[in-house]
Each structure stands twice: as C-alpha cells, then as structure tokens.
Amino acid sequence: ATRLTHPPTRATIGDMWKLAAIASSCLLLAACNRQDGALEPGSPDHRVSFTSASGSGAELDVWVADSDEERAQGLMGIEQLDEDHGMAFVFDEPSTGFFWMKNTLIPLSIAFVNEQGAIVSVLDMEPCESDSCPSYWSEAPYVLAVEANAGYFDRRGIGPGDRVRLTERSPDG
C-alpha cells in the first residue's frame, strides 16, 4: 500500500484514476497479444519440447501464464489457435487444482507435467459458455500444464510418462 503524507486532492485522485485506467488498458492490450478473438501470429515467446519413450519428439510454441491473473484468463475468448501454438501454465509449487473451460470457445487438450518433467495425464476438454462447466483434474500433482488444440497430443503420440521441457524461444524462431 502507498502511504500518503498529505490528504489526496481532487487532482491527485483524478491522476490516480487516469493512471489506473492507463495501466489497465496496457495490461489488456498486452495480455496474450489478443486481437479479434485470435492470438497474434508469431507471438509465443516460449517453446515446449516433448520427447516420447521411443525418442520421437514434438514442439509447441506457447504463451506462458505464470501469474494467478494470467492462469485465470488462459485461452478464454480465443476463437482460433494455430496448430503449433498453445499455452503453458507454470506453477511455483506442485498443484492439484483443476482446470475448466468457462468462456473458452475452442476445444483443447491439456497435458499435466510433474516436477520431474514427465507427463502425468492428458485430457481433452470441451468449450463451455454456461455457469456449470465441468472440471478437469490431473491424476497427480503438477508444476506445468500445457494446453493445445484438441487432439494435439494424441496426433503426435504424446502421453503419460513422456518428457517435457519448457524453454524460451530464440528470436529467430
């Protein structure tokens, strides 16, 4: 909290409201680079690499949600997602919380990853615009959850036990 040494004047209160409005606008504009219900192409700044037990692999370019606000927003309102794009939800401590698809417009799949970097479960999730959306739970605690278009993991043979690594993307892709 900010401690004021004198009572706020009308100008000070007005300035605070202006600053709050500007900050809110900047946050809304920056959040996931959203535009017209789509994520801006080429904007993911991280990459998730998957490696199966057989050694085959896949990569997904992701936006990272590592704050409570970003995780709560997730991919809500997104109307399309490129096939090789997704979102990585990063947690500081192992979590057992659930995910839901409230106000999410596209079907998604989610892979939950434990502290050792192994997938513990993969689920398919359906869009939901009602107030009573289903909850999607991991079978074990996780520190990373990766969302992609529905069927992404199945199409690439990615499943429980496979290894996952999250890295920053280099500027050239």
Image (tube, rainbow, N blue to C red):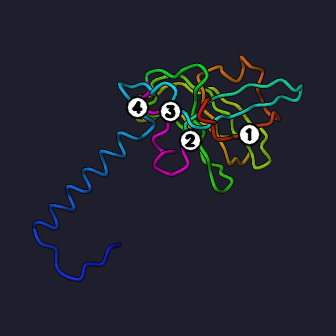
Q: Are marks 1 and 2 in contact (CB under 8 Å)?
A: no
Q: Which residues are magenta?
A: 65-78
Residue type marked 1:
Arg
Q: Real-space Cα distance between discs 2 and 4?
A: 14 Å
Residue type marked 2:
Val
Kindly give the residue lying farthest to the bottom in the view shown.
5
Classify residue 22 as left or right of residue 84: left
Residue type marked 4:
Arg
**Residue located at (43% from left, 22% from top):** 79
- How far across and down, in percent of the image, does residue 169 sit? 63, 36
The quadrant of the picture occupied by the C terminus is top right
- How far across and down, in percent of the image, does residue 70 sit? 48, 45
Residue carrying label 2: 64
Q: Secondary structure at mark 2?
A: strand
Classify residue 139 as left or right of residue 9: right
Q: Real-space Cα distance between discs 4 and 1?
A: 25 Å
Q: Are marks 4 and 3 in contact (CB under 8 Å)?
A: no
Residue carrying label 3: 101
